Image: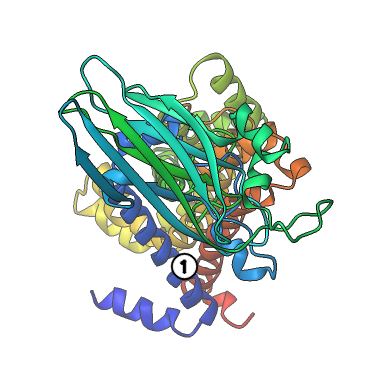
């Protein structure tokens, strides 16, 4: 505990380290929040569910905070559900059924038109389906009959596909026709701002039958992170990408650093053919194409994140770090306290793990922390290449989807920038902390 207190006192001398530590703490808090609020099974279901799960979201919608930085207010997605009390519900009982009226009211204060209006019916009946007529009321008092139809148990109705409504409005662009200000230029229509209503007048033909509905207005903005081509809320992948990235980076860096140090210590202590074998394996591994091997494993064997992690650690153990540690251990091996340990009969394992390795742990910690970003970027790079874990939602997979759907070409910059910024922030935070730790544990760097 005293050593930890002294370490934190030293870190306070470096504002960059404090800033990096704050960011890292925030990242771990986000990771814990993601795991607790969206359990693993739910996260996988949400991410792989596609349009069936995210039917209420528009495709390729930017985040809602875009309106904070623009003078032109773009429409945000609106969801009203009568089952949740979002509609005024009036029921009149009849001998053979019910008259049910659902009134959805919403304010529209945007400078552009929404993408779509959709009604999702959730009806209850046994034999004969209810009949519903839909009306649209504008802020200036106009009543527009949208459609009349029989409605099944689960049925959707898109306003833009109502052919009869096109004739009533006299335009092919139904949504613009519904929301356009009659006094605006027909060549460049503007939406009429104010309070709108969508009214469903339903008739059931059974006493216990019922009509419930959702009104969904697809805007050009949705959620805090936007949506992708499958209507998925990118918040899920951004949140869950945090624990995946941190776990991969920490395990890979820790496993590589610790195993490299242990193997180097064993080679130095036993010497002879053991040391020679370790050095020859290291030299062979240094010339192997690391990324190419990972690509081959992901292509021909498995893209599981655990397989990739294991291969990454295996290929990263026998690198230049072995030779660096070996040079240090050769000096420590000749120390007098090592001779004393030999004299009183300490075992090989005790000397390696109690006397050799502890001496270079101060050199291990900065390298371990600084190595985390490289492995985080490695996992993201593989996902960008299409070799990420097929199940997990990650930052790299978001970028891969964005590339395959032409996000930059179509102007969906948020789709790439959000995960890219998180990757940069993560790397920046660990790098700043690693540099500070290097100066703390290496006195020769303190004056630089």
Tell me where residue 4 appears, x and y as whole percent. Answer: 30, 74
Which residue is found at the position 27% from the left and 43% from the top? 348
Which residue is found at the position 33% from the left and 52% from the top? 86
Tell me where residue 28 appears, x and y as whole percent. Answer: 37, 59
Q: Is residue 42 above or below residue 428?
A: above
Which residue is found at the position 31% from the left and 37% from the top? 42
Quarter assignment of residue 48: top left
The residue sitting at the front extreme is 95
Residue 408 placement, left or right of 138: right
Q: Residues within 10 Å of mark 1 (few under 14, many from 20)?
A: some
> Which of 325 and 377 lies nearest the eye of the viewer?
377
- Specify the color scheme: rainbow
Whether residue 130 is visible to the viewer of this picture, yes or no, is yes
Q: Which residue is mark 1?
A: 23
> Which of 426 and 189 lies nearest the eye of the viewer?
189
Tell how many labels.
1
The residue sitting at the right extreme is 187
User: Which part of the image, by quadrant, shows the C terminus?
Assistant: bottom right
Which residue is found at the position 34% from the left and 80% from the top? 6
Q: Callout 1: helix, strand or loop?
A: helix
Tell me where residue 412 appears, x and y as whole percent. Answer: 69, 47
Tell me where residue 414 appears, x and y as whole percent. Answer: 64, 52
> Which of 199 and 311 lies nearest the eye of the viewer?
199
User: Which part of the image, by quadrant, shows the N terminus?
Assistant: bottom left
> Which of 286 and 395 lies nearest the eye of the viewer?
395
């Amino acid at each position: 505990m005293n050593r930890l207190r002294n370490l934190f006192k030293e870190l306070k001398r470096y504002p960059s380290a404090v800033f990096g530590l704050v960011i890292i703490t925030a990242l771990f808090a986000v990771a814990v929040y993601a795991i607790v609020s969206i359990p693993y099974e739910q996260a996988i279901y949400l991410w792989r569910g596609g349009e069936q799960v995210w039917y209420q979201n528009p495709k390729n919608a930017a985040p809602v905070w875009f309106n904070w930085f623009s003078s032109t207010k773009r429409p945000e997605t609106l969801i009203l559900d009568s089952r949740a009390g979002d509609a005024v519900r009036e029921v009149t009982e009849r001998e053979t059924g019910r008259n049910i009226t659902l009134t959805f009211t919403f304010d529209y204060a945007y400078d552009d038109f929404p993408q779509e209006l959709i009604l999702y019916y959730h009806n209850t009946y046994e034999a004969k389906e209810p009949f519903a007529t839909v009306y649209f009321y504008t802020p200036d008092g106009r009543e527009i009959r949208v459609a009349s139809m029989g409605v099944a148990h689960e049925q959707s109705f898109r306003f833009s596909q109502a052919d009869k409504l096109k004739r009533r409005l006299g335009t092919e662009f139904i949504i613009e026709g519904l929301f356009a200000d009659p006094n605006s230029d027909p060549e460049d229509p503007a939406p009429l701002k104010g309070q709108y209503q969508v009214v469903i007048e339903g008739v059931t033909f059974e006493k216990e039958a019922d009509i419930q509905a959702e009104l969904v207005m697809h805007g050009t903005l949705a959620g805090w992170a936007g949506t992708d081509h499958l209507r998925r809320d990118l918040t899920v992948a951004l949140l869950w990408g945090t624990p995946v990235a941190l776990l991969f980076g920490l395990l890979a860096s820790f496993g590589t650093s610790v195993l490299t140090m242990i193997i180097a210590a064993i080679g130095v202590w036993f010497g002879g053919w053991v040391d020679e074998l370790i050095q020859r394996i290291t030299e062979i591994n240094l010339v192997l194409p690391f990324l190419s091997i990972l690509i081959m494993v992901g292509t021909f064997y498995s893209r599981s994140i655990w397989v990739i992690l294991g291969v990454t650690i295996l290929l990263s153990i026998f690198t230049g770090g072995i030779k660096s540690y070996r040079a240090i251990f050769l000096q420590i091996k000749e120390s007098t306290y090592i001779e004393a340990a030999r004299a009183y009969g300490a075992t090989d394992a005790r000397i390696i793990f109690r006397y050799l390795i502890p001496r270079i742990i101060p050199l291990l910690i900065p390298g371990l922390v600084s190595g985390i970003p490289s492995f985080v970027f490695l996992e993201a790079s593989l996902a960008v290449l299409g070799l990420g874990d097929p199940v997990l939602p990650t930052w790299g997979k978001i970028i891969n989807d964005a590339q395959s759907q032409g996000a930059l070409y179509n102007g969906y910059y948020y789709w790439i920038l959000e995960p890219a910024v998180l990757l940069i922030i993560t790397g920046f935070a660990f790098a700043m902390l690693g540099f500070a730790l290097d100066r703390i544990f290496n006195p020769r760097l303190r004056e630089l």
